Amino acid sequence: MNESKPLARYSDAELQEFKQLILEKIDVAKQNYDHLMGTIQKDESSPSMIAIEDGSVTMSKEQASASAERQMQFIKKLQAALVRIEQKTYGICRVTGKLIPKGRLMAVPHTTLSVEGKEIEASRKKK
């Protein structure tokens, strides 16, 4: 990891733009999570589902549960990105210390790696 101070960072205005994007993504992810949890809880409380607990119902609940867990992890990553915005470290690659391109952050706002940093990390894991 590059321990030196980054030479550049995003402006406060750009950080606010990213913050708004992340807040919108958190809202959508929470709605998806709540929907999935509602589906799981409805299945568990439905007498017909309890009486007919076949493999497809079980698999459907497992898939919904796995999707809900992924949504919660996504929400946590987005919340961590908000912390980085407040600390003004958002958008700085944790491997290279360089600024992550704005386009990448718009596509994956919770990322902590530039493409270059991701490639470096992947090559380290192969060794």
Image (cartoon, rainbow, N blue to C red):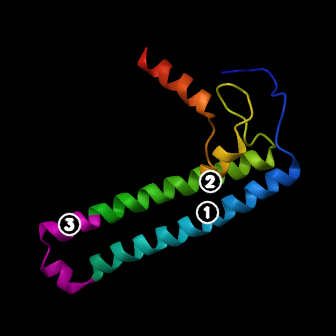
Q: Is residue 96 left or right of residue 87?
A: left
Other-residue count near label 2 (Cα within 10 Å), few / some / many at <14 / 14–19 / ≥20: many
Front: mark 3 or 2: 2
Identify the residue at image location x=12%, y=71%: 54
Q: Where is residue 99 in the image (x, y as percent from the top left)?
A: 74, 34
Dominant secondary structure, magenta = helix
The amino acid beneath tag 3 is Thr
Identify the residue at image location x=16%, y=68%: 56
The amino acid beneath tag 1 is Lys
Is residue 47 magenta-colored?
yes
Q: Magenta stretch: give its range.
A: 46-61
Q: Position of residue 29 (x, y in %)?
A: 54, 65
Front: mark 1 or 3: 1
Q: Looking at the image, do the residues carrying marks 1 and 2 touch, with CB atoms under 8 Å apart? A: yes
Q: What element carries label 1?
A: helix
Q: What element carries label 3?
A: helix
Residue under pointer 1: 25
Q: Position of residue 45 (x, y in %)?
A: 29, 81
Could you tell me how far apart the alpha carbons at marks 1 and 3 are, in whole angstroms? Answer: 30 Å
The amino acid beneath tag 2 is Leu
Residue furthest to the top in view is 127
Residue under pointer 3: 58
Q: Is 50 in front, or is 5? A: 5
Could you tell me how far apart the alpha carbons at marks 3 and 2 are, in whole angstroms? Answer: 30 Å
Q: In this view, does 19 lie to the left or right of 76?
A: right
Residue under pointer 2: 78
Figure check: 102 above or below 94: below
Q: Looking at the image, do the residues carrying marks 1 and 3 touch, with CB atoms under 8 Å apart? A: no
Which of the 4 image quadrants contains residue 21? bottom right
Figure check: 117 above or below 59: above
- Upstream in sequence: badge 1 or badge 2: 1
Counting the numbered discs, the total is 3
